[in-house]
Image (cartoon, grey):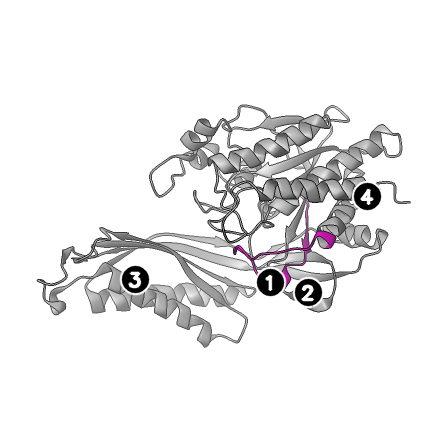
Amino acid sequence: MQVSSPTAGDLEEAIRLHRELDAIGATAGGGIDRQEATEDHTRSRTVIAEWLSARGFEVRVDAIGNMFGVWEHTPGAPYVLVGSHLDSQPCAGRFDGISGVVCAAVAGAVVRREVEAGHLTPRHNVAVVSWCNEEGARFQPALLGSSVYCGLLPLEEGLAARDRFGVRLADALESVGFRGTDEPPRPAAAVLELHAEQGVALEQAGVAVGVVTHCWSTLKWRLIFHGEQAHTGGWPMRSRKDALLAAAMFIVAHRALCEDFPEGTLRTAAAWIDVQPNSPNVVPSQVTLQCDARSDDETVLAAVRDRVRLTIAEIAEKTGVEIQVERFSDRQRIPLNDQGQQVIRDAASAVGEQTIDLPTVAGHDCLALQQHGVPAALMFLPSTGGIAHNEREHTSDADLQTGVLVLTEALRRAAGGALDQRDVQG
């Protein structure tokens, strides 16, 4: 029998809370710009912290800046983590991550109310979470806070991450009061995350809930092109070592890779570039370029890696520019927990919603925990037109309220032990 029942007031509160967050860091185009450890990002986290505190949750901030609203029903019991992130890309949408935190906060409050009313006796405690630096827009890598939480990234390495102006994450968190000292809620029994789909599968199917089965493999790398600074007028063309020209040749070649594989099997991007000295009348001496390739087929990415190295050698020989591969990083195909998938399906069915199964091409915080062995469940809500990382990103109020209903029911089941495995991760 379903006992976690958000009221009409709960559903209205979710929309009201979302609107309050939408106004923080709002852009002229209808989106938001709230990069990690900025003033606006801090304001958004303060809103959630105050909302949770007012409902009896203990707010903790750990050493990497993850924020938790902790409700310890049974001292010593493991925790079900539920949430997402509040940081954004530059000039981004209002739903990416934010909807997951809002729905998690409301779901957590409803489940707590049900327990305190005596309608539910959970096996696990609950912690609503806002992860630090999920986007990787200001500091790299992405999924930074969740990776530190579960041990995939050392704390010292995370705190040492720098933005393009050389500011360390540790110092940025300190400056806004979110470099915490609290112990994070552990051990983790499970993690739930709600997110906008960032695709069109749900919209095309006319279904409000997606059950994520796995994440595509991703290959990321950073290249540094070392050329020679010169006057754009005075220096002969054939004598130039133009770092920007070499980078441009690589970008074009990288995009053309997609044409060599079956349609839809490979997605590539060159999405971050830094040019030095980036001055008129000066041949660029150095360019740093960050690229990625994503596929559901790991053999495709293995071929891409080989092709990238060959392309680098060819461009270096042609331009006279030295090309340094600063780093390669792989994220292999990550299957989501089978029990977690079924929890989302059952929760949706319990509130009268249909589901479809689908993969995610993008990374999400719950994937970091799944890699560490914490059972993870990820559900998607529709994204209008599939638009994401864009000011026009949109998920309807009705779909957000459906998200509250489904996530509340999923949290009730997870707190009751529905995702338990034999060994709970530490």
Residue 239: quarter of image: bottom left
Which residue bears the numbered disc 3? Answer: 247
Mark 1 element type? helix
> Mark 2 vs mark 3: which is more N-terminal?
2
**Which kind of residue does numbered mark 3 sit on?**
Ala
> Mark 3 vs mark 4: which is more N-terminal?
4
**Label number found at residue 203:** 2
Which residue bears the numbered disc 1? Answer: 386
Mark 2 element type? helix
**Which kind of residue does numbered mark 1 sit on?**
Gly
Q: Is 177 colored magenta in this rendering? A: no
Q: Which residues are magenta?
A: 375-398
Q: Nearer the viewer, residue 122 or 195?
A: 195
The mark closer to the camera, 1 or 3, is: 1
Tags 3 and 4 touching, CB below 8 Å: no
The image shows residue 400 at horizontal and vertical percentages of: 71, 50
Distance between the alpha carbons at the discs numbered 2 and 1: 8 Å
The mark closer to the camera, 3 or 4, is: 4
Q: From where the camera sits, is residue 52 visible?
A: yes
The mark closer to the camera, 4 or 1, is: 4
**What quarter of the picture does the N terminus occupy?**
top right
> Residue visible at 58% across and 50% down?
96
Packing grade of label 2 (10 A; few <14, some 14-19, many >=20) is: some
The image shows residue 202 at horizontal and vertical percentages of: 69, 63
